[in-house]
Amino acid sequence: MYKKEISHNYLVILIMTGLLNGGALFAQYTDRNRNVDSLEQVLAINPPTGAALTTVYHDLMQVYMGINFEKSMEYARKCIETAIPLDGWQAVANGYRVLGINCYYMSQYDSALVHHGKAMEAAERMRDFPQKYKEQDIDFVFSSAYGNMANIYNMQGNYHKTVEYYQKALKIFENYGWEKSQAIAHLNIGDMYFCMENYEQAEMSYTKLETIACQINDSLLIAHSKFGLCMIFIHHGNYDQALKHANIARGYYFSHTEDVEGIYLVSILNILASIYLDGYDDDLTAEEYIRQAMHVTESMDISLTEKSASLRWLSAIYLKRGEWRKAEQTALEALATDDSEPANTLALYEILSKAYTHLGNAAKANEYFDKHNALQSSWSTRHYQSSLRELEVKYDTEKKEHEIARQQHVISRQNMERGMLAAASGVLLLGLAASLLLWRLSVHKRRLAEQQQQFAEQQIIQLEQEKRLIATQAVLEGEFQERARLARDLHDGLGGKLTGMRLRLQEFKKGATLNAADEERFDTAMDMLDDSVSEMRRVSHNLLPDALSRSGLKTAVDDYCRSMSPHIVFDWYGAQPRLDPQLELLIYRSIHELVNNALKYSGASQIMVQIMQEANSIDFTVQDNGCGFDPSAATKGTGLQNIRARVASYGGNMQIDSIVGEGTEINVELRVES
């Protein structure tokens, strides 16, 4: 989304104003800095003739270019008219170039292509005067035309043509050693390949750009190369490399804000947010970058499209956190800010559809799901109709030009037949082109239908997962309540009765006369009763440890580790506020299970248990130096699966790192509601 727009803004200024190679090969203009009033006064009071008049027209068309389209084009035509009789073909070429640029600014792309074609025809005429024009001057006209035509094809969405003409310009740049021009061409070729999803070629172009930019020590171009490589590595899922390149680009952009367009600042911050959000699941850092991007949009003159993009990323962060209402509100704000960029709007519709699904608003979820599909369909349809209209206009123009030529010249029957054949061929080509576009549209609609089906299936899977999680949480809550009830019943009910029975038996022994055999049997029964009390207390403690309910998670885990083995080391990091009782029991039981597994099966000489509590999360790790195992291999036990299911029910993650012969480390991350 960002790459195409940045590339276009940066290159159009350089190529279209003739500054791509520093302007060294343009004809030397007479007093180019003269103001418009003085030049037009010369024409009004004492107009020059011949080459001097051509120069005045040339300067005026340059001054008005991009400011007053009509004036610039008027003087460009006059420059061409006065230069042709004088064989001033370089001025003719520049005149057509300016006509092409002004047509481009007015979105008249077909006319712009025609004018640049005539500029190249004028360059060919320059070859007839080798004493007057150097080969380098001729090649510069061609390179400028190629660059301008590439930009036009880019705006039309014809990326293959865009790359073709950038590469034509690149060959000329390489021939004359124009290094900065080569670097910019590689930048834009890389952008086009990226848009075409040819990531291998895009990476090669960005790497060539980086090499040349380093050679000429152009830090801005180096930053652009890092920007492009960052996007490539994001696509490959290599977020470490993506982050490395993004930080280099960001470092330059923010240390040279006076030389860098605001769009670069916002874009690199949005990209960094996406890296942390999608690559590292770090929504807090992602939000920091989005907040910085939004600050830039407020302090600089940034387009509403970029402001909407930043809001879209913020809504994606809220969606990732499960803050459905915030995701909804931010996405709606993004749409209200700007909904002109289809790709951004499609993403916002998808976010809203998911947010409303989780909020239980099925009507709204379906509404935005339908909007997403309708926009995607109409987008492709408009592209098809636009392309078809361009073909029709082009064909009508050819017919009109043919009719004018027929009226102005006396032509033979053979020429008339050829004209009819050309018209028939044009109709045939139009029909073929229309058929091709229809075929492409049908393919796109089929892909769209497949995407819709995939999206619907994902929604169903997500809902099923949520149902399972809710069911698991209900089971855990029921289990917690049942454990608490059983622990109370054992401790307060059965425990009290067994203790009372022991006291009564002791009183009975004091008042009874027993022989040696009976006394031995009585003592054995008392020992069995003591064992029963101890076993009852152990079972009660396992169901719901006293230390856990009375003193909290840290004390309970510490007591458990000390009781199991002197080789277990327990550490706690961070604050120690009490958590939800069910969450505390989940963590305690998980550590209990993991430590028991390590003691039974790993043969470890040391086990480390660590808990780290922060404001919004709590993580715990159980690590041993035992025999290890293959996590991907199937196991008969259900202990790890049960822990994973319980952790998932709280929206947590569990990661197992184990190497046979080297030990095992199991990490669990859980979010704590503040």
Image (tube, helix red, strand yellow):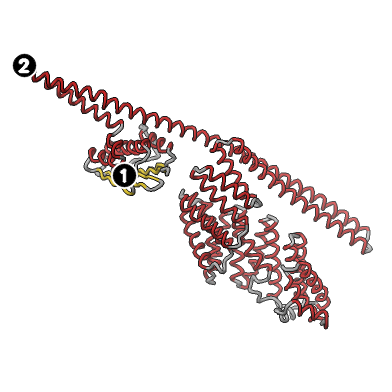
Crowding near pointer 2: few (<14 within 10 Å), some, many (20+)? few
Expressed as whole percent of the image width and height from the top left, the position of residue 473 reads 43, 33
**What residue lies at 45% left-to-right and 31% top-to-bottom?**
471
Q: Is residue 587 left or right of residue 408?
A: left
Quarter-of-image position of residue 355: top right
Residue type of the residue flagged with mark 2? Thr
Give percent across and percent down for residue 285.
46, 53
Q: Is residue 514 toward the left or the right of residue 640 in the image?
A: left
Say which of marks 1 and 2 sits in front. Answer: 2
Give the answer, above or below, for where 168 lies relative to 617.
Answer: below
Looking at the image, residue 90 sits to the left or right of residue 490; the answer is: right
Q: Which quarter shows the N terminus? A: bottom right
- Which residue position is annotated with label 2? 513
Q: CA distance from mark 1 to mark 2?
A: 58 Å
Figure quadrant of the C terminus: top left
Q: Secondary structure at mark 1?
A: strand
What number is the disc on residue 623? 1
Q: Is residue 107 above or below residue 618?
A: below
Q: Please, is residue 511 above or below residue 358 in the view?
A: above
Expressed as whole percent of the image width and height from the top left, the position of residue 71 reads 78, 70
Quarter of the image for residue 198 reads: bottom right
Residue at the image position 75 percent from the left and 68 percent from the top = 68
Secondary structure, mark 2, is loop
In this rendering, does residue 77 appear at all?
A: yes
The one nearer the camera, 301 or 272, is: 301
